Image (cartoon, rainbow, N blue to C red):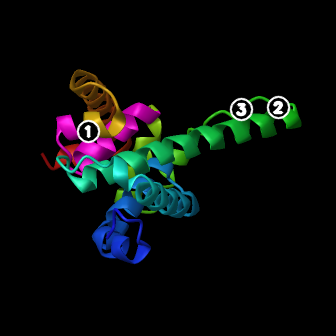
Amino acid sequence: MVLAGRAEAFEPLVTPYRGPVLALAYRLTRDREAAREVAQEAFLKAFRSLRKFDASRPFRNWLFQIAANEARDRLRERAREQAALRAAAGRAPAAADPEAGQDRLELRAGLLRLLDALSPREREVVVLRDLEELDVRETSRALGCSAAAVRVHLSKARRKLADLIRRDFPHLEEGR
């Protein structure tokens, strides 16, 4: 029924993934409204592409791949818009405020913000591997890259995050 294009048959298939896809989209875009749009578009694209789904692969991973691709597209679009606004305003990109790291409202929010210090690919790998708990092979499929590339990006990202945590949250080291 789902493969016949019946939307009502698709609903029970995606219902368990609404929260996880929205969480993934938010972690990648860092914007609630963008995350909602990414998740909605990912479900629409999944429905339209259901005939292409390889049933030998987990549905969750396929859906995450679609959502990650949509988030990546949204981030590129946002970067182009910001560059156009800066160009129109005739000014260079603003420098990062060194004081911003001190204004954390809570530890979790502060740690999630550290993801912004990573490159987009590193952030994708960390979110899929460490937060969504996909294995290396699943992550490589979701991102369309090799398992070796996932391992390299993950290693670099974890080193960066560890350095940032030591710098921004020294009190966490005391508990070791």
Q: In the structure shown, which secondary structural element does the residue marked by tag 2 occupy?
A: helix
Quadrant where the C terminus lies?
A: top left
Query: CB atoms at circles 3 and 1 under 8 Å apart?
Result: no
Q: Is residue 5 left or right of residue 132?
A: right
Which amino acid type corresponds to the residue marked 3 in the rendered image?
Answer: Pro
Query: Alpha-carbon distance for marks 1 and 2?
Result: 36 Å
Quadrant where the N terminus lies?
A: bottom left
Residue at position x 35%, y 52% in the image: 51
Q: Position of residue 104 (x, y in %)?
A: 46, 56
Query: CB atoms at circles 1 and 2 under 8 Å apart?
Result: no
Which residues are the magenta region? Answer: 120-138
- Whichever of callouts 3 and 1 sits on the residue coming sooner in the sequence is 3
Query: Alpha-carbon distance for marks 2 and 3?
Result: 9 Å
Which residue bears the numbered disc 2? 87
Q: Residues within 10 Å of mark 3 (few under 14, many from 20)?
A: few
Q: Is residue 164 in view from this perspective? A: no
Query: Alpha-carbon distance for marks 3 and 1?
Result: 32 Å
Q: Is residue 80 left or right of residue 25?
A: right
Q: Residue furthest left?
A: 176
Which amino acid type corresponds to the residue marked 1 in the rendered image?
Answer: Thr
Which residue bears the numbered disc 3? 93
**Quarter of the figure with residue 78:** top right
Q: Is residue 20 in view from this perspective? A: yes
Q: In the image, which is nearer the foreground, mark 1 or mark 2?
A: 1
Which residue bears the numbered disc 1? 139
In the rendered image of this protein, does residue 158 appear above or below residue 74?
above
Query: CB atoms at circles 2 and 3 under 8 Å apart?
Result: no
Q: Position of residue 7 (x, y in %)?
A: 43, 72
